[in-house]
Amino acid sequence: MAVKKATIQQQVAAAITEANPADKPLVTIQAVAGPSVWLMSMLGVIGQAFLTYYFITVTEQAVLVHKASMLSNRPKELAFAIPRTEATWLVSDVNRNTLWSWFRFQLPGQATPARMNVHRIWREELDQLLDHIVGQPVT
C-alpha cells in the first residue's frame, strides 16, 4: 500500500504514461469526493461507503481523474479526461481549512458539482493544481 506522497505520484504518473506516453503530468493530488470527511468518519464503515477516492492530475493536455483504490491507495481506471480549456469553468467554491480543504468540481455527466476534500499533506499540490486549472493562485 502506497502511503508516501512521492510513491503515490510515481504510480499515478506511471498510469498516465501507460495510457498516453506523449502526455506529461504536471501536478497530482489525492481527493476524497463526498460530504465532509469529518462527518463520514464519525459514521464509521457506513460513512466510508459515501466517499469516493480520486487522484486528480493536471497534465500538459488535460485534467485526468483516476479512481483510487481505498485499500491499496493505487490508481485504478481513468474515470474522466477533461481538456484543460474546458476544466477552467469546472472548479468553484474553494475552501481552505487547517486539516481538510475542499473545492467543488463539476465532473462530466454529474448533475451537481462534487465536493473534493483534500488533506493538508496535499496543500502545496492543491495550490498548484488550482493555479493550473483556474489560471491564478487561489488563497
Image (cartoon, rainbow, N blue to C red):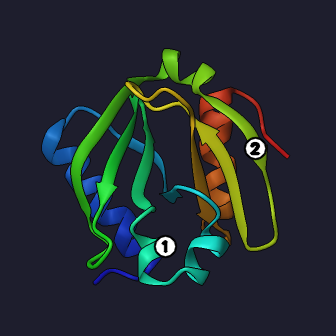
Q: Residue furthest right?
A: 139
Image position of 77 with respect to 111: above or below: below
Say what secondary structure mark 2 lies in: strand
Rate crowding at label 2 as few (under 14), some (14 to 19) or many (20 or more) other CA atoms within 10 Å. some
Q: Given the image, on which type of amino acid does mark 2 rest?
A: Val
Say what secondary structure mark 1 lies in: helix
Task: Determine the CA span between mark 2 and mark 1.
Answer: 23 Å
Q: In this rendering, which labeled residue sits more in front, label 2 or label 1?
A: 1
Tell me the residue at 76%/31% (across/down): 136
Image position of 124 with respect to 80: above or below: below
Q: Position of residue 111 (x, y in %)?
A: 49, 26
Task: From the viewer's perspective, tell me whether residue 7 is left or right of residue 43.
Answer: left
Tell me the residue at 68%/37% (across/down): 131
Q: Position of residue 29 (x, y in %)?
A: 50, 56
- Residue 61 visible in the snapshot: no
Q: Position of residue 83 (x, y in %)?
A: 41, 20
* Residue under pointer 2: 94
Tell me the residue at 37%/38% (across/down): 64
Tell me the residue at 28%/41% (across/down): 79
Q: Given the image, on which type of amino acid does mark 1 rest?
A: Gly
Task: From the viewer's perspective, tell me whether residue 125 is left or right of residue 107.
Answer: right
Q: Are marks 2 and 1 in contact (CB under 8 Å)?
A: no
Q: Residue furthest left?
A: 18
* Residue under pointer 1: 47
Q: Quadrant of the N terminus?
A: bottom left
Task: From the viewer's perspective, tell me whether residue 108 is left or right of residue 130.
Answer: left
